[in-house]
Image (spheres, rainbow, N blue to C red):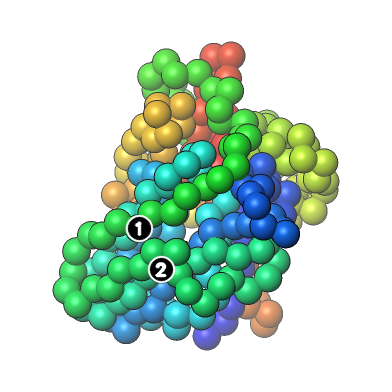
Amino acid sequence: MKKLRTFFSILIATVAFAALPKIAWACDVEHGLRSKTETGSYRVFVNGTFFKQQSEPSSGFGSSPFLDWLVTGENIVRIEYDGTDGQFGITKGCIGEFPEDEPVDQVTFDQPGSKILKFDHGGLVESEYLKAEIAGDAGLMDAVRQLQVAVRARDAETIFELQAPLFRDAIRQGFSLDNPRMITRKLLSEGVLDITEPLVVTPVMGGRVYQVLSPAFERPVSATIKDENGTFQWFSGTFWARFDGKWGIVGL
């Protein structure tokens, strides 16, 4: 199976480190999700916010780190699983290293259902969305349509303007945006475009952020390139917040 590389994974190094904890370890600590499934598919939500979904079996090796939508103190991870043989656990470890073998919390499934995992985030959370207004979703879908029009036109500059809050997080941490922007331009100019309809708007993170996904949890826009090296995908427009009356993307 060809390896799927998403634009989100490329941006991890430049966007999400503001949300990582600093606690009494000899390193910066992160938590993540480890899954092992033989049947079915699953969706994962962190503090009520969409994290990932997977329809293929998972091996139980490695861990998907939680980089966004964390809160100081207890964090809630909800697993929705439609199979009959699944194991899910919260991992803990130093950034850039393999996590500990023993999970912080774990659940098993022998029938379809929904279960909760918990972990404690010991540090302060710094993220651009915390500066956002809590004032309803008026005008949000106009901004989403603007993004979709820009993708159809392969207009990277308009997309970058809408992603300004996302990039402010990276700039505050001292990371360069050159590589993510270059990759976006390439995928937009050469990739197969997908514009998702219909879309469902859901307030998350206390109403500061709005999640925009299809009923099947597909993202509003994407571009995909397939070649001899694999499948490369860019997507955007999933998480929005409003700053000084203007909507912007705070999460892909």
Q: Which residue in the protein does label 1 denote? A: 117
Residue displayed at 35% across by 58% down: 117
Q: Which residue in the protein does label 2 denote? A: 89
Residue displayed at 52% across by 47% down: 121
Q: Is residue 218 left or right of residue 221?
A: left
Query: Which corner quadrant of the image does residue 160 belong to?
Result: top right
Q: Do the residues labelled 2 and 1 touch (CB within 8 Å)?
A: yes
The foreground one among 206 and 212 is 206
Q: Is residue 111 left or right of residue 161?
A: left
217 to 94, vertically: above or below = above
Q: Where is residue 2 in the image (x, y as percent from the top left)?
A: 57, 82
Q: Position of residue 139 (x, y in %)?
A: 44, 20
Q: Where is residue 74 in the image (x, y as percent from the top left)?
A: 42, 45
Q: Which amino acid does label 1 sit on?
A: Leu
The foreground one among 64 and 108 is 108
Q: Is residue 67 left or right of residue 97?
A: left
Earlier in the chain: of badge 2 and badge 1, it is 2
Q: Is residue 229 left or right of residue 206?
A: right
Callout 2: SS: strand
Q: Which residue extends farthest left?
A: 111
Q: Which amino acid does label 2 sit on?
A: Gly
242 to 21, vertically: above or below = above
Residue 149 visible somewhere in the drawing:
no
Callout 1: SS: strand
Residue displayed at 53% across by 55% down: 66
98 to 125, vertically: above or below = below
Query: Which corner quadrant of the image does residue 224 belong to?
Result: bottom right
